[in-house]
Image: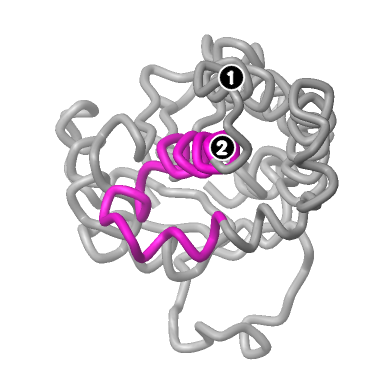
């Protein structure tokens, strides 16, 4: 397998997502109650999340720009209680700071440092983690975020943009991600190799996408490096 570059997904590939988002949402909600206490009489973290998710079909942009979705939802709840709309920008900074307090999987820092010596590394993510703030940006030649690019995985355009920046044929690039549909099938559709990062050791046939066949199935980055 002649691989010259590796592109990584971020959430649930380099760090666990669910606990991170839960903490960030609770941090934002606590701050929101300090600014506008009456919100707590009508909403919880869960109710605001449900309302935000219900907004996704209302604007095509929300399918790829999660920052815009969260900002619009926050502005909506502020308007509901006649609060200062400028709080939405401050609230998003609070959320973003908390969202960047990631707890990377143990293998990640050492493995990235090793792989950086042998491969061109990059990232493509549908989220909006700030790799500079997290401290791992130096490992990567570039990072593409859906909310900045204008479309999200599995849209082939976001993968093709990475290939153009790498100046490599698709078969020499390995994409690594936890989502079989967004990551594995998305990358394979443009000719990349694709590794399913199965951190939680699920059985492929137990997933909703058992028809998708990854080129590799790995549980951590050290296993990935050995397989390459």
**Sooner in the amino-acid sequence: mark 1 or mark 2:** 2
> Which label belongs to residue 34?
none
Q: Residue furthest front?
A: 82
What residue did someone put label 1 on? 87
Could you say where residue 205 lies in the image, as x and y percent from the top left? 63, 90
Say above or below: 131 vs 46: above
Residue placed at 39% from the left, 52% from the top? 1
Mark 2, secondary structure of its residue: helix
Rendering quarter of residue 168:
top left
> Which label belongs to residue 74?
2
Q: Is 10 in front, or is 121?
A: 10
Could you say where residue 59 lies in the image, as x and y percent from the top left? 29, 55
Residue 4 visible in image:
no
Main secondary structure of the magenta stretch = helix
Residue placed at 78% from the left, 63% from the top? 200
Could you say where residue 80 lies in the image, as x and y percent from the top left? 57, 43
Q: CA distance from mark 1 to mark 2?
A: 9 Å
Could you say where residue 69 lies in the image, as x and y percent from the top left? 45, 44
The answer to if 218 sits in the magenta stretch is no
- Image position of 151 (left or right of 214): left
Q: Disc 1 vs disc 2: Cβ atoms closer than 8 Å?
A: yes
Magenta extent:
52-79
Rendering quarter of residue 78:
top right
Colour scheme used in the picture? one colour
């Amino acid at each position: 397998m002649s691989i010259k570059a590796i592109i990584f997904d971020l959430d649930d590939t380099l760090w666990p997502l669910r606990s991170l988002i839960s903490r960030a949402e609770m941090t934002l909600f606590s701050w929101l109650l300090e600014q506008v206490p009456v919100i707590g009489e009508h909403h919880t973290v869960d109710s605001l999340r449900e309302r935000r998710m219900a907004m996704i079909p209302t604007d095509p942009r929300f399918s790829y720009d999660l920052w815009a979705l969260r900002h619009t939802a926050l502005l909506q709840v502020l308007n509901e209680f006649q609060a200062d709309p400028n709080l939405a920008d401050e609230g998003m900074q609070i959320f973003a700071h908390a969202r960047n307090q990631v707890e990377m999987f143990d293998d990640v820092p050492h493995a990235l440092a090793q792989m950086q010596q042998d491969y061109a590394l990059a990232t493509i993510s549908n989220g909006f983690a700030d790799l500079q703030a997290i401290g791992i940006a130096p490992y990567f030649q570039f990072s593409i975020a859906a909310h900045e690019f204008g479309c999200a995985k599995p849209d082939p355009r976001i993968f093709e943009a990475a290939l153009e920046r790498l100046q490599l044929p698709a078969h020499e690039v390995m994409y690594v991600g936890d989502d079989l549909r967004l990551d594995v099938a998305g990358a394979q559709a443009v000719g990349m190799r694709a590794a399913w990062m199965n951190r939680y050791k699920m059985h492929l046939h137990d997933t909703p996408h058992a028809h998708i066949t990854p080129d590799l199935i790995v549980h951590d980055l050290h296993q990935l490096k050995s397989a390459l």
